[in-house]
Amino acid sequence: MGAQSSKNKKRSTKKDTFGKKKELSHKRTDEEDGEDGNNIVNMASATPWLKRDINIDNDMTGAAILGDGRLLISKNGTKSLLLMTEKGKVLSSLTLGDYTWGIKMIDCTDGAVVVQNECLQFFTVTKRSIVKGNTLNVPVLFDFVFLDDFYYIGGDKKIMVYNNVLCHERDIPMSDAVGYMTNLDDTSLCFTVWGRRNVYCITTDGVPIFTYKHDMLRGTVGVTVDQEGYIYVCGYISKNVHQLNHEGNLQRIIFDNLPERPYCISFNQRDYLAVIGCIRKILLFELTRS
């Protein structure tokens, strides 16, 4: 594997992480939120309402919402990555070699998608297309995190750590295969074990921070963090999404009795939009002040 281009070397975690670092790097202004800031939403008490649902004709296992509202969707049924408008119009597609899973944007235009058992496939998003980029050949299972110039890649009983020129640095041993992943802040990782009941948080050195388990959370899959540092985890079997605080305690069950089984969740930080990816449906929620 050769080194990445200089473009990839300049990537910053500030545009990739959904935790405290991004919150500190950009404080919403009165110009963005209205003169008195009255549009600012408290995520601990925000009310979600279904803005739109979009039917998908094949199994969907990954979703990301971009800053302008466009959607990136990975579809297992067609082994592809789609770029869509907020209303569901397909702008571009990229066919890949195996089942596609977790998607992350690394900056405003560059991202990567997991191609199961094969690689981490990098791409660039333009106004109307997805352009295929470099490939990191590694047996990825479901997801990854880009944090502080390192890629933390979930594998079979380990998290593999690569630097920003795609050289392997080390492994963090795990007792199970790692499912979907996110980062809580600059030094910690949150992840699920596929289809279980637990959410785990560890340091980037592998030291346990907390474990979350709840009787009303079954079949844990997708996990993410919002701009205020609240954690969201999807229960595929329980058909809900739990919101946790920074310490890993239940804040509330924010999405309950969903019409479809949720696989993944992603936030648009600026406009308080949440996209929940289900097997054959995209649910787009807007969060407003209670």
Image (cartoon, helix red, strand yellow):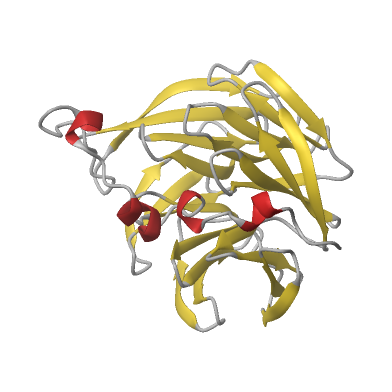
Which quadrant of the figure has residue 110? top right
> Is residue 110 visible to the viewer in this orientation of the structure?
yes
257 shown above or below 184: above
Residue for point 59% across, 59% down = 146
> Is residue 217 visible to the viewer in this orientation of the structure?
no
Q: Position of residue 16 (x, y in %)?
A: 51, 51
Q: Quadrant of the N terminus?
A: bottom right
25 or 73: nearer the viewer: 25
Q: Quadrant of the C terminus?
A: top left
Which quadrant of the figure has residue 111? top right
Q: Is residue 180 left or right of residue 212?
A: right
284 or 124: nearer the viewer: 124
Which quadrant of the figure has residue 10? bottom right
54 shown above or below 218: above
67 or 286: nearer the viewer: 67
Residue for point 48% across, 55% down = 17
200 shown above or below 219: below
Farthest-out residue, left? 36
Q: Is residue 80 left or right of residue 9?
A: right
211 shown above or below 250: below
Residue for point 61% across, 63% down = 196
Farthest-out residue, front? 6
Farthest-out residue, right? 97
Q: Is residue 167 left or right of residue 26?
A: right
Q: Is residue 138 left or right of residue 147?
A: right
Q: Position of residue 28 (x, y in %)?
A: 26, 41
Q: Position of residue 171 (x, y in %)?
A: 70, 79
Residue for point 55% across, 82% down = 205
Q: Count the marks.
A: 0
